[in-house]
Protein backbone atom coordinates (compact mmCIF):
# COMPACT_ATOMS: atom_id res chain seq x y z
CA UNK A 1 0.00 0.00 0.00
CA UNK A 2 1.39 3.39 -1.03
CA UNK A 3 1.37 6.37 1.33
CA UNK A 4 1.25 10.00 0.20
CA UNK A 5 2.79 13.11 1.76
CA UNK A 6 2.84 16.69 0.50
CA UNK A 7 6.41 17.90 0.17
CA UNK A 8 6.91 21.66 0.54
CA UNK A 9 10.58 22.55 0.41
CA UNK A 10 13.20 24.87 -1.03
CA UNK A 11 16.76 24.12 -2.07
CA UNK A 12 19.86 26.30 -1.83
CA UNK A 13 23.41 26.27 -3.14
CA UNK A 14 26.20 25.59 -0.65
CA UNK A 15 29.89 24.82 -0.57
CA UNK A 16 32.48 23.72 1.96
CA UNK A 17 32.65 27.22 3.46
CA UNK A 18 28.89 27.67 3.93
CA UNK A 19 27.72 28.03 7.52
CA UNK A 20 24.07 27.99 8.54
CA UNK A 21 22.75 31.11 10.29
CA UNK A 22 21.03 30.90 13.66
CA UNK A 23 17.42 30.14 12.70
CA UNK A 24 16.05 30.28 16.24
CA UNK A 25 13.76 33.27 16.48
CA UNK A 26 12.56 33.41 12.86
CA UNK A 27 8.80 33.15 12.49
CA UNK A 28 7.59 30.75 15.24
CA UNK A 29 10.91 28.94 15.65
CA UNK A 30 12.00 28.74 19.29
CA UNK A 31 14.69 26.06 19.15
CA UNK A 32 16.91 24.29 16.62
CA UNK A 33 17.54 20.64 17.52
CA UNK A 34 20.32 18.54 16.01
CA UNK A 35 18.95 15.28 14.54
CA UNK A 36 22.20 13.62 13.56
CA UNK A 37 23.59 12.36 10.28
CA UNK A 38 21.93 10.05 7.75
CA UNK A 39 23.57 8.15 4.89
CA UNK A 40 21.19 7.79 1.95
CA UNK A 41 21.64 5.72 -1.21
CA UNK A 42 19.17 6.40 -4.04
CA UNK A 43 18.81 4.87 -7.49
CA UNK A 44 16.70 6.98 -9.87
CA UNK A 45 14.62 5.42 -12.63
CA UNK A 46 13.38 6.91 -15.89
CA UNK A 47 12.85 5.98 -19.53
CA UNK A 48 15.98 6.01 -21.72
CA UNK A 49 14.81 9.35 -23.19
CA UNK A 50 14.02 10.71 -19.69
CA UNK A 51 10.30 11.35 -20.05
CA UNK A 52 9.73 11.55 -16.30
CA UNK A 53 12.49 14.09 -15.82
CA UNK A 54 11.09 16.23 -18.64
CA UNK A 55 7.75 16.31 -16.79
CA UNK A 56 9.31 17.20 -13.43
CA UNK A 57 8.63 13.70 -12.03
CA UNK A 58 11.09 11.55 -10.11
CA UNK A 59 11.00 7.84 -9.27
CA UNK A 60 13.67 6.46 -6.95
CA UNK A 61 14.56 3.52 -4.77
CA UNK A 62 16.26 4.75 -1.61
CA UNK A 63 17.83 3.01 1.35
CA UNK A 64 18.98 4.59 4.57
CA UNK A 65 17.26 7.29 6.59
CA UNK A 66 13.80 7.25 8.11
CA UNK A 67 11.79 6.75 4.92
CA UNK A 68 13.59 3.99 3.02
CA UNK A 69 11.57 2.64 0.13
CA UNK A 70 10.29 3.66 -3.29
CA UNK A 71 9.38 7.31 -3.76
CA UNK A 72 7.43 8.80 -6.66
CA UNK A 73 7.30 12.60 -6.70
CA UNK A 74 4.65 14.38 -8.77
CA UNK A 75 4.50 18.18 -9.29
CA UNK A 76 1.78 19.76 -7.15
CA UNK A 77 2.37 23.49 -7.60
CA UNK A 78 5.25 25.94 -7.16
CA UNK A 79 7.69 24.52 -4.62
CA UNK A 80 5.38 21.60 -3.82
CA UNK A 81 5.29 17.95 -4.78
CA UNK A 82 3.19 14.93 -3.88
CA UNK A 83 5.50 12.19 -2.66
CA UNK A 84 3.95 8.74 -2.95
CA UNK A 85 5.81 6.02 -1.07
CA UNK A 86 5.89 2.25 -1.32
CA UNK A 87 7.90 -0.39 0.58
CA UNK A 88 11.29 -1.53 -0.65
CA UNK A 89 11.34 -4.12 -3.41
CA UNK A 90 13.78 -5.17 -6.13
CA UNK A 91 11.81 -3.65 -9.02
CA UNK A 92 9.63 -0.54 -9.33
CA UNK A 93 6.29 -1.38 -7.67
CA UNK A 94 3.16 -1.47 -9.87
CA UNK A 95 1.29 0.91 -7.56
CA UNK A 96 3.81 3.59 -8.53
CA UNK A 97 4.56 2.68 -12.14
CA UNK A 98 0.83 2.77 -12.96
CA UNK A 99 0.82 6.44 -11.96
CA UNK A 100 3.34 7.32 -14.69
CA UNK A 101 1.96 5.05 -17.41
CA UNK A 102 0.49 7.97 -19.34
CA UNK A 103 3.98 9.55 -19.37
CA UNK A 104 6.18 6.62 -20.25
CA UNK A 105 3.66 4.91 -22.57
CA UNK A 106 5.36 1.70 -23.75
CA UNK A 107 8.91 2.63 -22.72
CA UNK A 108 10.75 0.68 -20.03
CA UNK A 109 11.75 2.26 -16.74
CA UNK A 110 15.47 1.72 -16.19
CA UNK A 111 18.06 2.90 -13.64
CA UNK A 112 19.51 6.22 -14.81
CA UNK A 113 21.62 7.73 -12.06
CA UNK A 114 22.72 6.88 -8.53
CA UNK A 115 23.05 9.36 -5.69
CA UNK A 116 24.66 8.95 -2.32
CA UNK A 117 23.95 11.63 0.23
CA UNK A 118 25.37 12.32 3.66
CA UNK A 119 22.67 14.39 5.32
CA UNK A 120 23.03 16.45 8.49
CA UNK A 121 19.59 17.28 9.82
CA UNK A 122 18.39 20.04 12.13
CA UNK A 123 14.78 20.33 13.25
CA UNK A 124 13.11 23.69 13.80
CA UNK A 125 10.60 23.58 16.68
CA UNK A 126 8.12 26.01 18.18
CA UNK A 127 7.90 27.00 21.84
CA UNK A 128 5.81 23.90 22.64
CA UNK A 129 8.42 21.62 21.08
CA UNK A 130 6.31 20.81 18.00
CA UNK A 131 8.29 20.39 14.76
CA UNK A 132 7.89 23.12 12.14
CA UNK A 133 10.53 22.33 9.54
CA UNK A 134 13.74 20.45 8.84
CA UNK A 135 16.95 21.98 7.59
CA UNK A 136 19.24 19.48 5.90
CA UNK A 137 22.80 20.07 4.76
CA UNK A 138 23.52 17.48 2.08
CA UNK A 139 26.85 16.25 0.74
CA UNK A 140 25.92 14.59 -2.56
CA UNK A 141 27.79 12.24 -4.88
CA UNK A 142 26.21 11.27 -8.21
CA UNK A 143 27.26 9.02 -11.07
CA UNK A 144 25.59 7.07 -13.92
CA UNK A 145 23.75 3.96 -12.75
CA UNK A 146 25.78 0.81 -13.20
CA UNK A 147 29.03 2.56 -14.15
CA UNK A 148 30.60 2.61 -10.72
CA UNK A 149 30.01 0.88 -7.45
CA UNK A 150 31.22 3.72 -5.28
CA UNK A 151 32.08 7.39 -5.43
CA UNK A 152 35.52 8.03 -6.83
CA UNK A 153 35.48 5.24 -9.42
CA UNK A 154 36.32 6.19 -12.96
CA UNK A 155 33.42 6.96 -15.31
CA UNK A 156 33.14 6.32 -19.03
CA UNK A 157 34.09 8.87 -21.66
CA UNK A 158 31.81 11.90 -21.62
CA UNK A 159 30.30 11.00 -18.26
CA UNK A 160 31.75 11.95 -14.94
CA UNK A 161 31.08 11.66 -11.29
CA UNK A 162 29.52 14.79 -9.78
CA UNK A 163 29.82 16.08 -6.25
CA UNK A 164 28.18 19.07 -4.61
CA UNK A 165 26.76 20.45 -1.40
CA UNK A 166 23.27 21.87 -0.93
CA UNK A 167 20.78 22.92 1.72
CA UNK A 168 17.13 21.87 1.92
CA UNK A 169 14.49 23.51 4.09
CA UNK A 170 11.27 21.47 4.26
CA UNK A 171 8.08 22.14 6.19
CA UNK A 172 7.10 19.28 8.51
CA UNK A 173 4.38 20.80 10.67
CA UNK A 174 1.48 18.68 9.45
CA UNK A 175 -1.70 20.67 8.87
CA UNK A 176 -0.11 23.80 10.34
CA UNK A 177 2.58 24.08 7.67
CA UNK A 178 3.01 27.73 6.76
CA UNK A 179 5.01 28.74 3.67
CA UNK A 180 5.75 32.00 5.47
CA UNK A 181 8.32 30.10 7.53
CA UNK A 182 10.17 29.24 4.33
CA UNK A 183 10.22 32.92 3.39
CA UNK A 184 11.72 33.82 6.76
CA UNK A 185 14.32 31.05 6.48
CA UNK A 186 15.23 32.20 2.97
CA UNK A 187 15.85 35.75 4.17
CA UNK A 188 18.05 34.45 6.97
CA UNK A 189 20.03 32.30 4.53
CA UNK A 190 20.38 35.16 2.05
CA UNK A 191 21.82 37.33 4.81
CA UNK A 192 24.81 34.95 5.05
CA UNK A 193 25.22 34.62 1.29
CA UNK A 194 23.19 31.46 0.63
CA UNK A 195 21.08 31.62 -2.53
CA UNK A 196 18.41 29.40 -4.14
CA UNK A 197 19.68 26.40 -6.10
CA UNK A 198 19.77 26.71 -9.87
CA UNK A 199 18.63 23.10 -10.38
CA UNK A 200 15.04 22.12 -9.63
CA UNK A 201 16.09 18.86 -7.93
CA UNK A 202 19.05 16.67 -7.07
CA UNK A 203 18.17 14.49 -10.03
CA UNK A 204 18.19 17.42 -12.47
CA UNK A 205 21.60 18.52 -11.23
CA UNK A 206 22.97 14.97 -11.30
CA UNK A 207 21.87 14.45 -14.90
CA UNK A 208 23.38 17.76 -15.95
CA UNK A 209 26.73 17.36 -14.20
CA UNK A 210 27.27 13.72 -15.11
CA UNK A 211 26.49 14.35 -18.79
CA UNK A 212 23.46 12.07 -18.74
CA UNK A 213 20.88 14.59 -19.90
CA UNK A 214 20.26 14.14 -23.63
CA UNK A 215 21.22 17.16 -25.72
CA UNK A 216 17.88 16.94 -27.58
CA UNK A 217 15.51 14.75 -25.54
CA UNK A 218 12.90 13.10 -27.75
CA UNK A 219 10.23 13.35 -25.07
CA UNK A 220 6.75 13.42 -26.50
CA UNK A 221 5.14 14.62 -23.32
CA UNK A 222 7.58 17.52 -23.08
CA UNK A 223 6.94 18.38 -26.72
CA UNK A 224 3.21 18.34 -26.08
CA UNK A 225 3.63 20.66 -23.10
CA UNK A 226 5.99 23.13 -24.74
CA UNK A 227 4.71 23.24 -28.29
CA UNK A 228 8.09 24.35 -29.64
CA UNK A 229 8.39 21.72 -32.34
CA UNK A 230 4.87 22.07 -33.68
CA UNK A 231 4.97 25.82 -34.24
CA UNK A 232 8.21 25.71 -36.24
CA UNK A 233 7.01 22.74 -38.30
CA UNK A 234 3.71 24.41 -39.11
CA UNK A 235 5.41 27.62 -40.23
CA UNK A 236 7.62 25.58 -42.52
CA UNK A 237 4.64 23.67 -43.91
CA UNK A 238 2.75 26.90 -44.62
CA UNK A 239 5.75 28.54 -46.30
CA UNK A 240 5.86 31.26 -43.64
CA UNK A 241 8.79 33.08 -42.15
CA UNK A 242 9.76 32.53 -38.55
CA UNK A 243 9.22 36.14 -37.55
CA UNK A 244 6.00 38.02 -37.22
CA UNK A 245 3.69 35.04 -36.86
CA UNK A 246 3.28 34.75 -33.14
CA UNK A 247 0.32 36.21 -31.31
CA UNK A 248 0.79 38.50 -28.35
CA UNK A 249 -0.44 35.88 -25.90
CA UNK A 250 -2.61 38.40 -24.03
CA UNK A 251 -5.97 37.16 -22.80
CA UNK A 252 -9.21 39.07 -23.01
CA UNK A 253 -7.73 41.82 -25.13
CA UNK A 254 -10.68 42.22 -27.47
CA UNK A 255 -10.97 41.60 -31.20
CA UNK A 256 -7.42 42.79 -31.80
CA UNK A 257 -6.05 40.61 -29.03
CA UNK A 258 -4.11 37.41 -28.70
CA UNK A 259 -3.43 35.20 -31.67
CA UNK A 260 -4.86 37.44 -34.38
CA UNK A 261 -1.60 37.34 -36.36
CA UNK A 262 -1.21 33.58 -36.08
CA UNK A 263 -2.52 30.86 -38.33
CA UNK A 264 -5.51 28.62 -37.77
CA UNK A 265 -3.11 25.69 -37.60
CA UNK A 266 -1.22 27.29 -34.73
CA UNK A 267 -4.47 28.03 -32.90
CA UNK A 268 -6.00 24.58 -33.18
CA UNK A 269 -2.86 22.56 -32.56
CA UNK A 270 -2.06 24.58 -29.44
CA UNK A 271 -5.56 23.87 -28.16
CA UNK A 272 -5.23 20.16 -28.93
CA UNK A 273 -1.82 20.14 -27.27
CA UNK A 274 -3.24 21.75 -24.12
CA UNK A 275 -6.08 19.23 -23.80
CA UNK A 276 -3.68 16.31 -24.19
CA UNK A 277 -1.45 17.86 -21.54
CA UNK A 278 -4.42 18.01 -19.16
CA UNK A 279 -5.36 14.38 -19.81
CA UNK A 280 -1.81 13.17 -19.16
CA UNK A 281 -1.40 15.29 -16.02
CA UNK A 282 -4.73 14.15 -14.58
CA UNK A 283 -4.11 10.45 -15.19
CA UNK A 284 -2.38 9.85 -11.81
CA UNK A 285 -4.99 11.98 -10.03
CA UNK A 286 -7.81 9.86 -11.45
CA UNK A 287 -6.02 6.68 -10.45
CA UNK A 288 -5.61 8.04 -6.90
CA UNK A 289 -9.27 9.09 -6.75
CA UNK A 290 -8.49 12.79 -6.26
CA UNK A 291 -11.77 14.76 -6.02
CA UNK A 292 -13.00 16.25 -9.32
CA UNK A 293 -10.17 14.63 -11.31
CA UNK A 294 -12.47 12.33 -13.29
CA UNK A 295 -14.65 15.28 -14.26
CA UNK A 296 -11.72 17.39 -15.39
CA UNK A 297 -10.19 14.55 -17.40
CA UNK A 298 -13.53 13.86 -19.05
CA UNK A 299 -13.96 17.53 -19.95
CA UNK A 300 -10.49 17.62 -21.56
CA UNK A 301 -11.38 14.48 -23.54
CA UNK A 302 -14.60 16.05 -24.76
CA UNK A 303 -12.91 19.33 -25.65
CA UNK A 304 -10.35 17.46 -27.68
CA UNK A 305 -13.01 15.54 -29.58
CA UNK A 306 -15.02 18.72 -30.16
CA UNK A 307 -11.97 20.46 -31.60
CA UNK A 308 -11.57 17.68 -34.16
CA UNK A 309 -15.25 18.00 -35.13
CA UNK A 310 -15.42 21.80 -35.16
CA UNK A 311 -12.16 22.67 -36.91
CA UNK A 312 -12.43 20.43 -39.96
CA UNK A 313 -10.98 23.20 -42.15
CA UNK A 314 -7.73 22.83 -40.19
CA UNK A 315 -7.37 19.11 -39.45
CA UNK A 316 -8.22 16.35 -41.90
CA UNK A 317 -11.43 14.71 -40.70
CA UNK A 318 -10.45 11.48 -42.38
CA UNK A 319 -7.57 11.21 -39.88
CA UNK A 320 -9.21 12.72 -36.81
CA UNK A 321 -12.59 10.94 -37.04
CA UNK A 322 -11.23 7.56 -35.85
CA UNK A 323 -9.32 9.34 -33.07
CA UNK A 324 -12.51 11.17 -32.14
CA UNK A 325 -14.27 7.83 -31.89
CA UNK A 326 -11.69 6.64 -29.38
CA UNK A 327 -12.02 9.87 -27.43
CA UNK A 328 -15.79 9.31 -27.33
CA UNK A 329 -15.13 5.85 -25.90
CA UNK A 330 -12.78 7.24 -23.24
CA UNK A 331 -15.24 9.98 -22.26
CA UNK A 332 -17.97 7.36 -21.92
CA UNK A 333 -15.80 5.18 -19.67
CA UNK A 334 -14.92 8.15 -17.49
CA UNK A 335 -18.55 9.22 -17.59
CA UNK A 336 -19.67 6.15 -15.67
CA UNK A 337 -17.73 7.37 -12.63
CA UNK A 338 -18.48 11.07 -13.14
CA UNK A 339 -22.20 10.57 -13.74
CA UNK A 340 -22.38 8.50 -10.57
CA UNK A 341 -20.69 11.31 -8.61
CA UNK A 342 -23.10 13.94 -9.93
CA UNK A 343 -26.17 11.75 -9.47
CA UNK A 344 -25.24 10.73 -5.93
CA UNK A 345 -24.64 14.35 -4.90
CA UNK A 346 -28.00 15.35 -6.40
CA UNK A 347 -29.92 12.58 -4.65
CA UNK A 348 -28.23 13.09 -1.29
CA UNK A 349 -29.03 16.80 -1.45
CA UNK A 350 -32.61 16.05 -2.46
CA UNK A 351 -33.13 13.64 0.45
CA UNK A 352 -31.67 16.19 2.87
CA UNK A 353 -34.32 18.70 1.72
CA UNK A 354 -37.19 16.35 2.58
CA UNK A 355 -38.72 16.97 6.05
CA UNK A 356 -38.07 14.10 8.42
CA UNK A 357 -41.79 13.49 8.76
CA UNK A 358 -41.84 12.59 5.04
CA UNK A 359 -38.78 10.32 5.09
CA UNK A 360 -40.60 7.03 5.46
CA UNK A 361 -38.42 3.98 5.87
CA UNK A 362 -34.62 3.67 5.82
CA UNK A 363 -34.24 6.14 2.94
CA UNK A 364 -30.71 7.28 3.80
CA UNK A 365 -29.47 3.71 4.24
CA UNK A 366 -31.08 2.57 0.98
CA UNK A 367 -29.46 5.46 -0.91
CA UNK A 368 -26.07 4.78 0.71
CA UNK A 369 -26.14 1.09 -0.24
CA UNK A 370 -27.15 1.96 -3.80
CA UNK A 371 -24.40 4.59 -4.10
CA UNK A 372 -21.62 2.39 -2.68
CA UNK A 373 -22.51 -0.49 -4.99
CA UNK A 374 -22.47 1.74 -8.05
CA UNK A 375 -19.29 3.48 -6.88
CA UNK A 376 -17.37 0.22 -6.61
CA UNK A 377 -18.50 -0.82 -10.09
CA UNK A 378 -17.69 2.52 -11.72
CA UNK A 379 -14.35 2.86 -9.93
CA UNK A 380 -13.21 -0.57 -11.09
CA UNK A 381 -14.28 0.29 -14.62
CA UNK A 382 -12.28 3.53 -14.71
CA UNK A 383 -9.11 1.85 -13.44
CA UNK A 384 -9.49 -1.00 -15.92
CA UNK A 385 -9.82 1.59 -18.70
CA UNK A 386 -6.63 3.44 -17.71
CA UNK A 387 -4.73 0.16 -17.38
CA UNK A 388 -5.90 -1.13 -20.73
CA UNK A 389 -4.11 -1.30 -24.08
CA UNK A 390 -6.81 0.72 -25.82
CA UNK A 391 -6.18 3.80 -23.66
CA UNK A 392 -2.44 3.51 -24.15
CA UNK A 393 -2.90 3.25 -27.91
CA UNK A 394 -5.07 6.38 -27.87
CA UNK A 395 -2.40 8.41 -26.07
CA UNK A 396 0.26 7.24 -28.52
CA UNK A 397 -2.00 8.17 -31.43
CA UNK A 398 -2.57 11.66 -30.05
CA UNK A 399 1.14 12.22 -29.58
CA UNK A 400 1.78 11.01 -33.12
CA UNK A 401 -0.92 13.31 -34.47
CA UNK A 402 0.74 16.32 -32.85
CA UNK A 403 4.15 15.32 -34.14
CA UNK A 404 2.84 15.00 -37.70
CA UNK A 405 -0.49 16.88 -37.81
CA UNK A 406 -2.89 16.13 -40.71
CA UNK A 407 -3.18 19.76 -41.76
CA UNK A 408 -5.59 20.95 -44.41
CA UNK A 409 -5.14 24.11 -46.53
CA UNK A 410 -7.25 26.09 -44.06
CA UNK A 411 -4.50 25.60 -41.46
CA UNK A 412 -2.48 28.28 -43.21
CA UNK A 413 -5.30 30.83 -43.14
CA UNK A 414 -5.48 33.58 -40.49
CA UNK A 415 -6.72 32.20 -37.19
CA UNK A 416 -9.57 34.72 -36.70
CA UNK A 417 -11.11 33.91 -40.07
CA UNK A 418 -11.20 30.13 -39.59
CA UNK A 419 -12.10 30.33 -35.89
CA UNK A 420 -15.11 32.56 -36.51
CA UNK A 421 -16.37 30.26 -39.25
CA UNK A 422 -16.08 27.21 -37.00
CA UNK A 423 -17.88 28.81 -34.08
CA UNK A 424 -20.71 30.16 -36.22
CA UNK A 425 -21.12 26.80 -37.96
CA UNK A 426 -21.55 25.10 -34.59
CA UNK A 427 -23.93 27.85 -33.48
CA UNK A 428 -26.21 27.21 -36.47
CA UNK A 429 -26.30 23.55 -35.55
CA UNK A 430 -27.19 24.46 -31.97
CA UNK A 431 -29.95 26.81 -33.12
CA UNK A 432 -31.57 24.07 -35.20
CA UNK A 433 -31.55 21.67 -32.27
CA UNK A 434 -32.99 24.21 -29.84
CA UNK A 435 -35.86 24.97 -32.26
CA UNK A 436 -36.51 21.22 -32.62
CA UNK A 437 -36.57 20.79 -28.83
CA UNK A 438 -38.93 23.72 -28.30
CA UNK A 439 -41.33 22.31 -30.91
CA UNK A 440 -41.20 18.72 -29.60
CA UNK A 441 -44.19 17.38 -27.63
CA UNK A 442 -43.72 17.14 -23.86
CA UNK A 443 -42.40 13.83 -22.60
CA UNK A 444 -39.69 11.51 -23.85
CA UNK A 445 -39.46 13.10 -27.30
CA UNK A 446 -38.72 16.49 -25.78
CA UNK A 447 -36.29 15.01 -23.28
CA UNK A 448 -34.30 13.44 -26.11
CA UNK A 449 -34.39 16.64 -28.18
CA UNK A 450 -33.25 18.76 -25.25
CA UNK A 451 -30.37 16.36 -24.57
CA UNK A 452 -29.26 16.64 -28.22
CA UNK A 453 -29.43 20.43 -27.92
CA UNK A 454 -27.33 20.26 -24.78
CA UNK A 455 -24.58 18.36 -26.59
CA UNK A 456 -24.67 20.92 -29.42
CA UNK A 457 -24.39 23.74 -26.87
CA UNK A 458 -21.37 22.11 -25.31
CA UNK A 459 -19.67 21.72 -28.69
CA UNK A 460 -20.38 25.35 -29.58
CA UNK A 461 -19.03 26.55 -26.27
CA UNK A 462 -15.85 24.51 -26.65
CA UNK A 463 -15.33 25.85 -30.17
CA UNK A 464 -15.65 29.41 -28.86
CA UNK A 465 -13.26 28.74 -25.98
CA UNK A 466 -10.69 27.33 -28.42
CA UNK A 467 -11.11 30.50 -30.50
CA UNK A 468 -10.40 32.92 -27.66
CA UNK A 469 -6.70 33.48 -28.47
CA UNK A 470 -7.74 34.52 -31.98
CA UNK A 471 -11.04 36.33 -31.34
CA UNK A 472 -10.43 37.69 -27.85
CA UNK A 473 -13.23 39.10 -25.68
CA UNK A 474 -16.10 38.49 -28.14
CA UNK A 475 -15.37 34.75 -28.08
CA UNK A 476 -15.27 34.82 -24.29
CA UNK A 477 -18.64 36.57 -24.06
CA UNK A 478 -20.20 34.28 -26.64
CA UNK A 479 -18.94 31.17 -24.82
CA UNK A 480 -20.32 32.52 -21.55
CA UNK A 481 -23.80 32.98 -23.06
CA UNK A 482 -23.80 29.52 -24.62
CA UNK A 483 -22.59 28.03 -21.34
CA UNK A 484 -25.74 29.30 -19.64
CA UNK A 485 -27.84 27.45 -22.23
CA UNK A 486 -25.72 24.34 -21.71
CA UNK A 487 -26.08 24.51 -17.92
CA UNK A 488 -29.86 24.86 -18.11
CA UNK A 489 -30.11 21.92 -20.50
CA UNK A 490 -27.65 19.99 -18.35
CA UNK A 491 -29.81 20.43 -15.27
CA UNK A 492 -32.77 19.18 -17.27
CA UNK A 493 -30.85 16.08 -18.37
CA UNK A 494 -29.64 15.46 -14.82
CA UNK A 495 -33.29 15.47 -13.77
CA UNK A 496 -34.11 12.87 -16.42
CA UNK A 497 -31.29 10.64 -15.14
CA UNK A 498 -32.24 11.24 -11.50
CA UNK A 499 -35.82 10.12 -12.16
CA UNK A 500 -34.52 6.87 -13.58
CA UNK A 501 -32.40 6.29 -10.47
CA UNK A 502 -35.31 7.17 -8.15
CA UNK A 503 -37.51 4.67 -9.95
CA UNK A 504 -34.82 2.03 -9.40
CA UNK A 505 -34.48 2.94 -5.72
CA UNK A 506 -38.24 2.88 -5.20
CA UNK A 507 -38.45 -0.57 -6.77
CA UNK A 508 -35.65 -1.90 -4.56
CA UNK A 509 -37.27 -0.41 -1.46
CA UNK A 510 -40.65 -1.89 -2.39
CA UNK A 511 -39.14 -5.33 -2.93
CA UNK A 512 -37.46 -5.11 0.50
CA UNK A 513 -40.78 -4.21 2.15
CA UNK A 514 -39.62 -0.68 2.99
CA UNK A 515 -42.07 1.32 0.90
CA UNK A 516 -41.20 3.81 -1.81
CA UNK A 517 -43.14 6.91 -0.74
CA UNK A 518 -40.13 9.20 -0.25
CA UNK A 519 -38.54 8.21 -3.54
CA UNK A 520 -41.88 8.86 -5.26
CA UNK A 521 -41.99 12.28 -3.66
CA UNK A 522 -38.50 13.05 -4.96
CA UNK A 523 -39.52 11.78 -8.39
CA UNK A 524 -42.33 14.32 -8.47
CA UNK A 525 -40.00 17.12 -7.43
CA UNK A 526 -37.60 16.21 -10.24
CA UNK A 527 -40.46 16.30 -12.73
CA UNK A 528 -41.36 19.80 -11.56
CA UNK A 529 -37.72 20.88 -11.75
CA UNK A 530 -37.43 19.66 -15.33
CA UNK A 531 -40.62 21.51 -16.26
CA UNK A 532 -39.15 24.69 -14.78
CA UNK A 533 -36.04 24.32 -16.95
CA UNK A 534 -38.21 23.85 -20.04
CA UNK A 535 -40.12 27.04 -19.28
CA UNK A 536 -36.87 28.95 -18.76
CA UNK A 537 -35.25 27.80 -22.01
CA UNK A 538 -36.90 30.29 -24.42
CA UNK A 539 -35.78 33.24 -22.30
CA UNK A 540 -32.21 31.99 -21.85
CA UNK A 541 -31.93 31.07 -25.51
CA UNK A 542 -33.23 34.46 -26.62
CA UNK A 543 -30.38 36.17 -24.74
CA UNK A 544 -27.70 33.79 -25.99
CA UNK A 545 -28.83 33.98 -29.62
CA UNK A 546 -28.74 37.76 -29.98
CA UNK A 547 -27.25 38.71 -33.32
CA UNK A 548 -24.75 41.14 -31.75
CA UNK A 549 -22.85 38.30 -30.06
CA UNK A 550 -22.35 36.52 -33.38
CA UNK A 551 -21.55 39.70 -35.29
CA UNK A 552 -18.77 40.50 -32.82
CA UNK A 553 -17.04 37.23 -33.71
CA UNK A 554 -16.49 38.15 -37.34
CA UNK A 555 -12.95 39.49 -37.98
Image: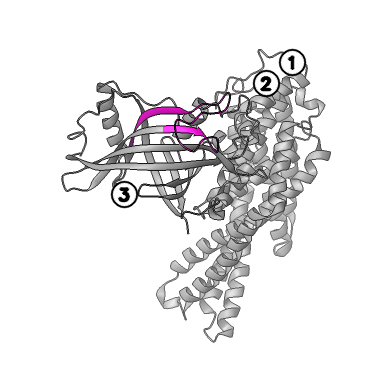
- Asked if residue 114 can be seen in this view, the reply is yes
Q: Position of residue 151 (x, y in %)?
A: 44, 33
Q: Secondary structure at mark 2?
A: loop
- Up the image or down, 7 lies above or below 268; here it is below
Q: Residue at x 51, y 26 (%)?
A: 160
Q: Position of residue 467 (x, y in %)?
A: 65, 31
Q: Which residue is labeled 2 in the image?
A: 262
Q: Is residue 458 magenta?
A: no
Q: Secondary structure at mark 3?
A: helix
Instruction: Give whichever of 57, 356 is nearer the camera.
Output: 57
Report crowding for label 3: few under 14, some 14 to 19, many 20 or more residues within 10 A (C-alpha): few
Q: Residue at x 62, y 42 (%)?
A: 104
Q: Nearer the viewer, mark 3 or mark 2?
A: 3
Q: Is residue 161 magenta?
A: yes
Mark 3 vs 2, N-terminal side:
3
Q: Position of residue 155 (x, y in %)?
A: 53, 29
Q: Which mark is residue 174?
A: 3
- Asked if residue 434 can be seen in this view, the reply is no
Query: Residue 238's quadrant in the figure?
Result: top right
Amino acid sequence: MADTVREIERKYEADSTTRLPDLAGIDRVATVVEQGVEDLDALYYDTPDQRLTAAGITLRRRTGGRDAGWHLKLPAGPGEREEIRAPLSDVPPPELTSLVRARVLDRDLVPVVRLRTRRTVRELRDAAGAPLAEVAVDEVWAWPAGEAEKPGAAGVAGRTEARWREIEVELTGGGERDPGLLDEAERALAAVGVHPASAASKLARALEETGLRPARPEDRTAAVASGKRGAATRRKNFGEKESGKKGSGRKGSGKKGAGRRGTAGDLVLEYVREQLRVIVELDPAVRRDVPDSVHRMRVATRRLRSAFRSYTKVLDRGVTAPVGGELKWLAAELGVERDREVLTDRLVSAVADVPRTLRLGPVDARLRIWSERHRAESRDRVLATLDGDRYLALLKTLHALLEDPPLRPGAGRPAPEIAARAVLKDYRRLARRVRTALDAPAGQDRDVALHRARKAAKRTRYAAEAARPALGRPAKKFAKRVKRVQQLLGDHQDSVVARGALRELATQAQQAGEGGFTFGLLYGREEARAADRERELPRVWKKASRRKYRAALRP
